[in-house]
Amino acid sequence: MSDPATERLQIPAPDALMAPLARLLRPMVRLMIRAGITFPVLEDLLRSLFVDVAQNDILPDAKSRTDSRISLLSGVHRKEIRRLRLEPQALLETPPIVTIASQIIARWLGAAPWMAADGTPLPLPRGNEEVSFERLVESVTKDMRPRAILDSWLADGVVSIDADEHVVLNGAAFVPQPGKDAQLFYFGRNLHDHIAAACANITAVGRAPFVDRSVHYDRLPADIADKLAAISRDAAQKMLLEINRAALRMTEVAEAEMPATRRVNLGVYLYIDDDAAGG
């Protein structure tokens, strides 16, 4: 019996997907090899994911989630499916500090009285004033001490202390430090959402539901590529700040009884590579 949800999708043929999948996975495989993740480890992860997705995403009706049906869809042997059902699943939780940090910096970059008239984040006294770093943190959370967040951000270079003993946000936006928990969280979430949007567009019947556009040029001199990179960073930063401010304005006036069940993730990427290396 066919799945009604699948029938409403425009599913590409398996052969047509193999080449783009190989290209998509190549940088991931490169990262895994460098990180010491071998193929058997990845194989175990994929086996578990195939079973989990077949069971929870493809078969919404609990009665249809038999080992035989899941095995048919995933290609995983029923014996393995029974074993995986008994294993605890890893929880994909957002680290609390990541959520809190994002909210604090979003408010600092996008809402009065924390930003200047020109939209730049104000240097903030540490505390004891109505407009201060302490009040900014407390406007988002009462569960973490402002001093603990300040010490953490100073250590990571997110903020600095100026000559007037004010807290200054470094850069126009929060960029997690390489290899830290925050960067790894965004690595998984942002790539997941980009790929999920692209997959939804590929399988859509009619108009593609999500934005997935890029500007790309080949065979450029290095100096032009560098200039385009600088222009792109500036334009992307302005766009993201504008969206952040719009979101803060709308959420502040939203009615309390309105259901809050949606999330929005808008991302921008820039990549420069050698033509020969990129194929």
Image (cartoon, rainbow, N blue to C red):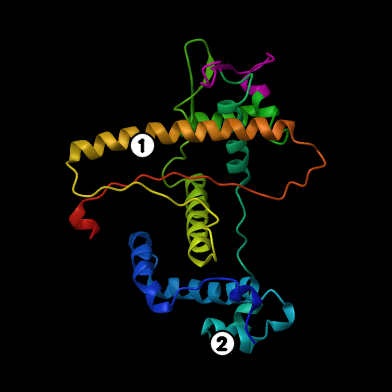
The image quarter containing residue 166 is top right
Q: Which residue is mark 2?
A: 72
The disc placed on residue 73 is none
Q: Nearer the viewer, mark 2 or mark 1?
A: 1
**Total tally of numbered discs in the picture:** 2
Q: Is residue 139 above or below residue 200?
A: above
Q: Main secondary structure of the magenta part?
A: loop
Task: Report x, y in % for residue 70.
Answer: 60, 83
Name which residue lies at 53% across and 22% down: 121
Q: Secondary structure at mark 1?
A: helix
Magenta span: 116-135
Q: Label 1 is placed on what type of residue? A: Ser
Task: Report x, y in % for residue 242.
Answer: 53, 31
Q: Which residue is mark 1?
A: 232
Q: Is residue 231 above or below residue 278?
A: above
Name which residue lies at 71% across and 50% down: 261
Task: Report x, y in % for residue 255.
Answer: 79, 36
Quadrant for the N terminus, please.
bottom right
Alpha carbons under labels 2 and 1: distance apart: 46 Å
Task: Report x, y in % for residue 7.
Answer: 60, 76
Judge by depth and name the residue closer to the eye, 152 or 173. 173
Judge by depth and name the residue closer to the eye, 106 or 169. 106
Q: Label 2 is placed on what type of residue? A: Leu
**As drawn, is 107 to the left or to the right of 21?**
right
Q: Secondary structure at mark 2?
A: helix
Q: Residues within 10 Å of mark 2 (few under 14, many from 20)?
A: few
